[in-house]
Image (cartoon, rainbow, N blue to C red):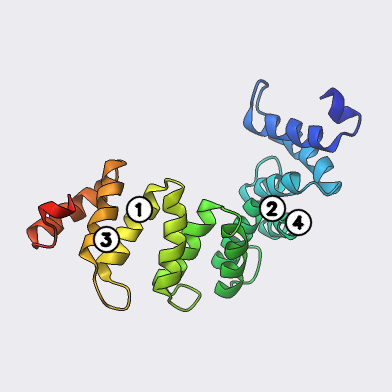
Amino acid sequence: MKAALKGHVVAQYNVGVVYRDGQGVGKDEGRAFDWLSKAADKGNDLAQFALGGLYWDGMGVTKDAFRAARLWRKAADQGNAFAQKALGTAYSEGVGVPQSGADAAAWWLKAARQGNVDAQLSLAYASANGVGIARDDKAAESWWLEAAKAGNVDAEFSLGTLYYRGIGGKPNYKDAAKWFLKAAGHGNASAKTWIELMKENGQLDSKML
């Protein structure tokens, strides 16, 4: 707070986050908005992303998706992966910006390349299902693999369903079982159901276990 009062931009951002989350102080969304606004006005990308979240959710300020998207764009243009992911979602939903699957995918791609797992998942899902962009199973496979490397259980399960369905119409039960087993081992109940289904259909043998 002492540093923030002297105009230190990172301190202003930190004070804003502390008030937003109620970390060590009473939660105060109004003060969070004030401090994050100060830092955002100085061009801090983290503050711009956080302030956009306040506008998006209507925390400490009237809900305004347009302003949220505008702030996320400022942060995204500075390379903030979280803002890039959020902006992609805004384009996907057509909230605060015109709906555009292509723009959504473009921003998710920027974030995904920086290792943002949520963006990788969104891009993989859009590619696998042709949502907003052309269906591309290989692209979906690539991004789910990246997310799975980070230990994401949803990605593990999704890889199982992708291989079960088959890339190019050719099911790969061995790899499907591999990823379903990984996901099941991490507590995914749906993966356990798929494993039982594969056993019943004779698609999984002891060599895969």
Q: Which mark is first along the chain, 4 or 1?
A: 4
99 displayed left or right of 206? right
- Relative to 115, is 30 above or below? above
Identified by mark 1, the residue type is Glu
Residue to which mark 4 is pinned: 78
Instruction: Nearest to the eye among marks 2 and 3: give it.
Output: 3
Give, as a three-letter code, the residue at label 4: Gln
Q: Earlier in the sequence, mark 1 or mark 2?
A: 2
Residue located 46% across and 70% down the image? 139
The front one of 118 and 208 is 208
- Tell me the CA gap for discs 3 and 4: 39 Å
Q: Where residue 31 appears, x then y in whole percent?
A: 76, 33
- Residue 71 sits in quarter: bottom right
Residue furthest top as drawn: 24
Quick check: 36 above or below 24? below
Whole-percent x, y for residue 167 in the image: 32, 73
Q: Name the outermost residue toward the front.
A: 207
Q: Is residue 90 left or right of residue 149?
A: right
State which tag comes first along the sequence, 3 or 4: 4
Residue underneath mark 3: 175
Q: State if disc 4 and disc 2 touch (CB < 8 Å).
A: yes
Which label's residue is closer to the chain start, 3 or 1? 1
Asked whether the beta carbons under mark 3 and mark 4 sit within 8 Å of each other, the answer is no
Vertical order, 81 against 91 (above or below): above
Q: In which quarter of the image is the N terminus?
A: top right
Q: Which amino acid does label 2 sit on?
A: Asn
Q: Say which residue label 2 marks.
A: 80
Mark 4 secondary-structure assignment: loop
| Disc 4 crowd, CA 10 A, few/some/many (<14, 14-19, 20+) | some
